[in-house]
Image (cartoon, rainbow, N blue to C red):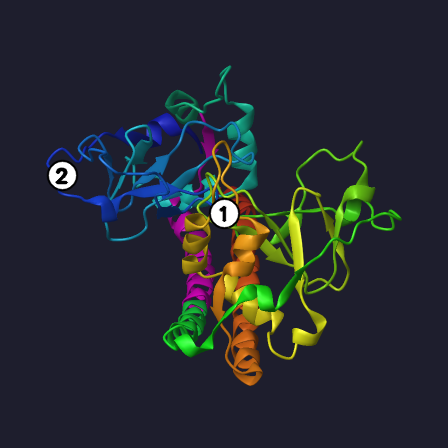
Amino acid sequence: MKYKLLRLIEPIDDRNSDEEYSLSDVKGISIQKVFIETKAKMDGVSLKPYKLVKPDSFAYVTVTSRNGEKITLAYNDTEDTYIVSSSYIVFKVKEPELLSSEFLFMYFNRPGFDRFARYNSWGSARETFSWDDMCDIEIDLPPLYIQEKYVAIYKAMLANQKAYENGLEDLKLTCDGYFDKLKKDRSLYKKLGNFIEKNELRNIDKKLNKEHVRGISNKKEFILTKADISKTDLSKFLVIPENFFAYNSRTDGRDMLVLAINKLDEPVIVTWNYNSFNIIDNKLKELNPDFLFAFFKRAEFDRLVRFMSWGSSQELFSWDSLCDVKIPVPNIEIQNSIAQLYNVYLERKQINERLKQQIKDICPILIAGAIKEANANA
């Protein structure tokens, strides 16, 4: 049967009026549709107006513009209560005998729902998908027992992915443990400038085209550029060969250094506004590039970068500042072992991301399968 969501869901406006919940309970929502630690600055912010997201409840942000063509929504499948900004809309299923909350979340997890929400968003300065828009959605609903059957498949896949993810964290903790041990030995510390040199290689011959252009993400990875480069002179771009680094010296508004190492089998090119460097050839027996990158990925390095950044209108982390950074440099065998372990962690992290994407991709298949089975049994 088909139902409007208006019949099946209801808003919740429970507030943190007595401040039962604290800063540790504050959550944001990612475009991956999960609750995350908030990135907002909370100094001096009263938590009394914050909304409670109790177990088996949903929350979403109505604003959809500049949001990667997705709607920011999450489902609390834990036993904990979270608190979210008062601007969020919190709701729950009010007809549990007709609709499983987890089946509804599968429905929301489909790319088709994101497209629908974006298409039905309205506004001038900001486009929003309102509560009324949400309630106006018509959903084809199979019987509850069929919903639960397909939810069980979804949850089994999710459990496998979570188990894999937990193993990832063990690897990360092991890597962090090695670095924490190294940083206690002050005799190992050496200036980075002793090992690196600036890379000024340009794409003068234009052998590398727009397919090779990359940006750098906040995850410290090279990504396909989002900029319009159709009329850009690529001869000015910096060439980044394998195991060379590139970074954006601007740090204001980021609290991190946007940096990446090229681990592809071919060079990439980046804007001339970036800086690039490599480990000096005769120093490669003393410093492993992968070990150095693992050091750059640590949160304490980003904190140091922010501390060492200067500027009025723009805060910059200069080349000289990078060269002044002191890092622990153990013997190359220890570096190689840590680098190998860290590379295993990165590889498995990519596998985990693919697993999560596969789960998201299967949501529309499961929804369609449930509807097809319901129609066959009708």
Q: Quadrant of residue 273?
A: top right
* Residue 103 image point, x, y percent: 41, 45
Check if residue 44 falls in the magenta segment.
Answer: no
The question of residue 157 being in magenta is answered with yes
**Of the numbered discs in the image, which one, if any, rests on residue 1?**
none
Task: Please tell me the numbered disc located at residue 370.
Answer: 1
Secondary structure state at the residue bearing disc 2: loop
**Mark 2, mark 1: which one is toward the viewer?**
2
The percent position of residue 141, horizontal first and vertical second, equals 44, 38
Left or right placement of residue 74 versus residue 45 in this view:
right
Residue that extends furthest to the left in the rendered view of this protein: 18
Q: Amino acid at mark 1?
A: Ala
Q: Which residue in the protein does label 2 denote?
A: 19
Depicted 229 relative to depicted 129: above or below? below
Q: Find numbered disc 1 in the image and state the secondary structure of the residue it sits on.
A: helix
State the extent of the magenta-drawn residues as a range: 137-166
Residue 221, located in which quarter of the rendered image?
Answer: bottom right
Identify the residue at image location x=47%, y=49%. 256
